[in-house]
Image (cartoon, grey):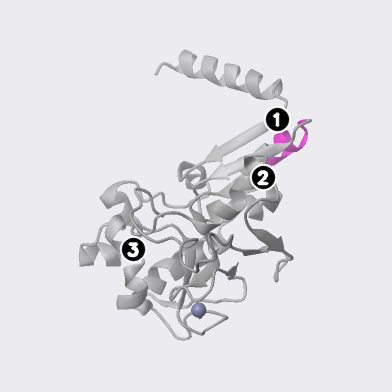
Amino acid sequence: MREEDIADKLKRAAEAIKYADALLISAGAGMGVDSGLPDFRGTHGFWRAYPVIAKLGLSFEEMANPAWFNDNPHFAWAFYGHRLNLYRKTTPHQGFTQLLEIGSAKPGGYFVFTSNVDGHFQKTVFAPERIVECHGSIHHLQCAATCTDEIWDACNENVTVEESTFRALEPLPRCRNCRALARPNVLMFGDHRSARHDLLSPPLRGRAGEGGTTSAGVCGSPPSLTLPRKGGGNGDAFPARASAHAI
Ligand SMILES: [Zn+2]
């Protein structure tokens, strides 16, 4: 695209934003790249970020699979623990703050719909109740054995990853209810949807109050959350099978 065309499109976009009554921000992996986060685009992009996994020849689709938490928990938590630590220590770029300022000044405010699991909108102090994380959040955990519908804040967990072996060291995060292994509340290949998406979507759809409940967060922000019960069953609010998307 020619430079003038880009300038023209940016001008039109700026005008549209200037005169909008409200701002709906949709975000994906590209949003984090300017903060210095890898986007895992293509197998080689993923392998650049994780050379140890490249040596094993595993694609992102093969790595982002909940089966690892059963088959090799220390390896599974090495991958997700490394990402948890990376997202915690990375500062969201200035664009987050600018969007928050623009959205906050609108009469209708803002809403965020993001497939990112890094929690960087909350880190920029976007209001948690105005964010839908459709692929879940790495900052929340769920029971890998699905003993409960609950998800909870991972803020009290510290995962140490031994770089040389790419193994997470004990203690691994455990279910606060049954002490089985916990896993991140993120949508993986093999899951069918994110419980967090189900939970956070109603306000966006103008149906606040339907679905799950929220309560005050253990660590302040974001709030701890309870999954919606569907038909009284335990398992069907959890990510389960056959997803075309994963993180
Ligand atoms: Zn459990």
- The residue closer to the viewer here, 65 or 41, is 65
- The alpha-carbon separation of the residues under discs 1 and 2 comes to 15 Å
| Callout in the foreground (3, 2) | 2
Badge 1 is on which residue?
Answer: 22
Q: Are marks 1 and 2 in contact (CB under 8 Å)?
A: no
What's the mark number on residue 191?
none
| Residue named by callout 3 | 65
Q: Residues within 10 Å of mark 1 (few under 14, many from 20)?
A: some
Instruction: Residue under label 2, please give it.
Output: 203
* Separation of residues labelled 3 and 2 (CA atoms): 30 Å
User: In terms of secondary structure, where does tag 2 sit?
Assistant: helix
Q: How many angstroms separate mark 3 from mark 1 (CA)?
A: 37 Å
Q: Position of residue 27 (x, y in %)?
A: 52, 41
Quadrant containing the N terminus in the rendered view:
top left
Can residue 126 be spotted in the picture? no
**From the viewer's perspective, is residue 108 above or below residue 31?**
above
Asked if marks 3 and 2 touch (Cβ < 8 Å), the reply is no
Pointer 1 or 2: first along the chain: 1
Q: Residue type at mark 3? A: Asn
Report the quarter where the C terminus lies.
Answer: bottom left
- Between 126 and 94, which is closer to the camera in this rendering? 126
**Region rendered in magenta:** 100-106
Q: Is residue 142 above or below residue 162?
A: above
- What SS does tag 3 mark? loop
Question: Along the polypeptide, which appears first: circle 3 or circle 2?
Answer: 3
Three-letter residue code for mark 2: Pro
Q: Nearer the viewer, residue 122 or 22?
A: 22
- Name which quarter of the figure residue 206 lies in: top right
Q: Main secondary structure of the magenta part?
A: helix
For mark 1, give the secondary structure: loop
Q: Amino acid at mark 1?
A: Ala
Q: Position of residue 232 (x, y in %)?
A: 54, 65
